[in-house]
């Protein structure tokens, strides 16, 4: 891929290709980038660590936290800055330093690995302290639901930085069987904002799923849903700075709303799949003619050859 005037830079091209990588196939796409993007290959290679870090964050990839016996999602909410391979783990209040898998053939390109941890800076601890109780309450309220609804999923809940009060819940689950030609992933992000002056809470969410099936073809499905609405406030509100029992009540109300909205989305998806099978796919099939007799394509081929031979003879006679 060469670069003409006004065209995207090689780094932009590589970023776009990685951004659209199907689930569980980032190593294969990365190998293709190295082959296809030939302009400024050294510059592209130097940018790959940051591009992979952003790709892992965008896809909500999970890593094992050393010494903590738990998993943490890599998300834009926890990434220190764009292109950085350092992420924040709110459960252990540590910074995770991640191997994004930059070397050709590295397994970390498919499954990133946390190589080391370091303490969260004091200024970050102070900025997150005001919402930490609400963060923990949201994590407890969502844990059972996420585990039951999405087996194998990883849940990570962040506290909003002061002066805001609230929490961000991220969870994802993925499944792949590349030898059987399919892979899929689902990621969800919900944000809970508490307005202490108004005594009101608001929830906004985005869920998106992708499925890739590639046996004798290449078919992808993308589905997403967004929400933005008020959270039914518990009696008395969550209290100053969303602490104590008030935080637990608000988190429970938030979790109930999340479960209700996502369940409705799942039912809608199932209804759409039934409709797709009953109507859309059947409409794509070739119907029988009015005579109800199947067309003999072999005879049609014979007639076509005969017509062509006849045309050749006429041409020779002229």
Image: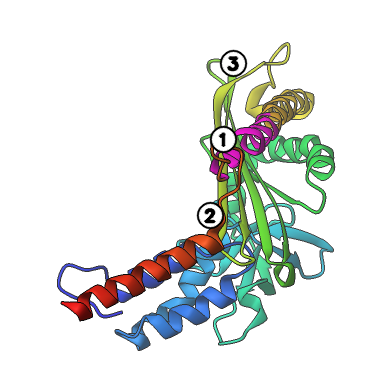
Residues in magenta? 268-285
Q: Residue 199 carries which label?
A: 3
Nearest to N terminus: mark 2 or mark 1: 2
Nearest to N terminus: mark 3 or mark 2: 2
Q: Residues within 10 Å of mark 1 (few under 14, many from 20)?
A: few
Q: In this view, does 219 lie above or below 131?
A: below
Q: Is residue 249 above or below residue 63?
A: above
Q: Name the residue under label 2.
A: 76
Q: Is residue 88 above or below residue 99?
A: above
Q: In which quarter of the image is residue 160?
A: top right
SS type, badge 3 = loop
Q: Can residue 194 be seen in this view?
A: yes
Count of numbered tags = 3
Q: In which quarter of the image is residue 174?
A: bottom right
Residue 73, position as x, y percentages in the image: 67, 57
Q: How far, Cα to Cα, is label 2 from label 1?
A: 19 Å
Q: Is residue 278 above or below residue 25?
A: above
């Amino acid at each position: 891929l060469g670069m003409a005037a006004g065209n995207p830079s090689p780094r932009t091209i590589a970023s776009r290709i990685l951004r659209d990588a199907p689930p569980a196939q980032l190593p294969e796409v990365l190998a293709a980038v190295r082959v296809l993007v030939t302009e400024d290959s050294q510059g592209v290679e130097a940018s790959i660590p940051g591009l992979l870090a952003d790709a892992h964050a965008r896809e909500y990839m999970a890593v094992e936290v050393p010494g903590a016996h738990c998993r943490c999602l890599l998300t834009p909410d926890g990434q220190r800055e764009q292109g950085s391979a350092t992420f924040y783990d709110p459960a252990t209040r540590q910074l995770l330093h991640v191997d994004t898998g930059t070397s050709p053939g590295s397994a970390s390109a498919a499954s990133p690995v946390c190589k080391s941890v370091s303490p969260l800076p004091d200024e970050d601890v102070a900025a997150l302290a005001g919402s930490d109780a609400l963060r923990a309450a949201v994590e407890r309220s969502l844990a059972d639901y996420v585990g039951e609804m999405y087996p194998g999923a990883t849940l990570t809940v962040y506290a909003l930085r002061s002066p805001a009060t609230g929490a961000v819940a991220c969870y994802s689950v993925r499944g792949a069987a590349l030898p059987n030609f399919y892979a899929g992933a689902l990621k969800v992000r919900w944000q809970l904002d508490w307005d202490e002056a108004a005594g009101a809470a608001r929830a906004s969410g985005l869920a998106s799923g992708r499925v890739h099936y590639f046996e004798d073809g290449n078919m992808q499905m993308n589905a997403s849903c967004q929400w933005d609405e008020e959270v039914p406030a518990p009696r008395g509100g969550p209290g100053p700075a969303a602490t104590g029992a008030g935080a637990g009540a608000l988190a429970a109300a938030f979790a109930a709303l999340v479960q209700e909205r996502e369940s409705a989305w799942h039912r809608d998806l199932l209804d759409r799949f039934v409709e797709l099978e009953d109507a859309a796919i059947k409409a794509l099939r070739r119907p029988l003619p009015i005579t109800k007799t199947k067309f003999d394509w072999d005879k049609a081929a014979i007639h076509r050859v005969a017509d062509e031979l006849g045309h050749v003879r006429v041409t020779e006679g002229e």
